Image: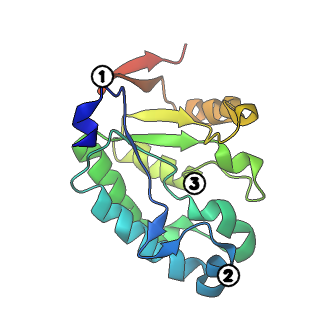
Amino acid sequence: AVLDQYPYDYVIGSLHYVGEDLMFDNELLRRKGADGIMQSYFLELEEMTRNPQFDILGHMDVPVRNGGPIWKSYDPRRYEKPIRAVLQNCIDHGISLEVNSGGLRRPANNLMPDLRILQWYCEMGGQRLTLGSDAHTPGHVGLHLDQALRCIRDFGWKFLTRYAGRQPSALPLE
């Protein structure tokens, strides 16, 4: 009902909780470890993308932003099956995948999603990417987007997706 009340240009869907667990809680990340967090996270994300009410999937593997330095062993290949299911849902439902540079200003020093996940998305025929910096303060707006842009160009992307009135269109990178 809220989405129908206003003329949004786009709606971002992102997952911050699995059950009652906040995916940024450092104590939880330590206690449950990468497998305890990421398996549940990707399964929930797969369910979320089955019948989406949003246009863009935001910071797809966000627990790594805080968990990566704690775990020191995160490898998306361990969760390839549920990750690929999420990516397939995005492709099937026309959901754009956000390449988020917010992790580059944190100890994990990572793009979200992980580069391997971007590679899988590309190999699977994914077409829609957006950029985001996950800014929560004015000084972080657009921070490290140049690095994110270089990365997607290295994967061969020629355009980004932009939205107006929740309708996607291609924005050439040249």
Spatial CA span between label 3 and label 2: 20 Å
Sequence order check, earlier mark of 2 and 1: 2
Mark sitting on residue 96: none
* Nearer mark to the viewer, of 1 and 3: 1
Q: Residues within 10 Å of mark 2 (few under 14, many from 20)?
A: some
As shown in the figure, which amino acid type bears the numbered disc 3?
Asp
Residue 108 visible in this rendered orientation of the protein: yes
- Helix, strand or loop at disc 3? loop
Q: Name the residue carrying label 3.
A: 114
Q: Name the residue carrying label 2.
A: 30
- Helix, strand or loop at disc 2? helix
Residue 59 position (above or below residue 158) = below
Q: Residue at x 55, y 13 (%)?
A: 174
Image coordinates of residue 38 in percent, x first then y, are 50, 72
Q: Nearer the viewer, residue 110 or 29?
A: 29
Name the residue at the bottom extreme: 31
Badges 2 and 1: C-beta atoms under 8 Å apart?
no
Q: Quadrant of residue 43?
A: bottom left
* Nearer mark to the viewer, of 3 and 2: 2
As shown in the figure, which amino acid type bears the numbered disc 2?
Arg
Q: Nearer the viewer, residue 4 or 82?
A: 4
Q: Name the residue carrying label 1.
A: 165
Image coordinates of residue 6 in percent, x first then y, are 29, 29
- Is 25 left or right of 14, judged from the image as shown? right
In the rendered view of the protein, which quadrant contains the N terminus?
Answer: top left
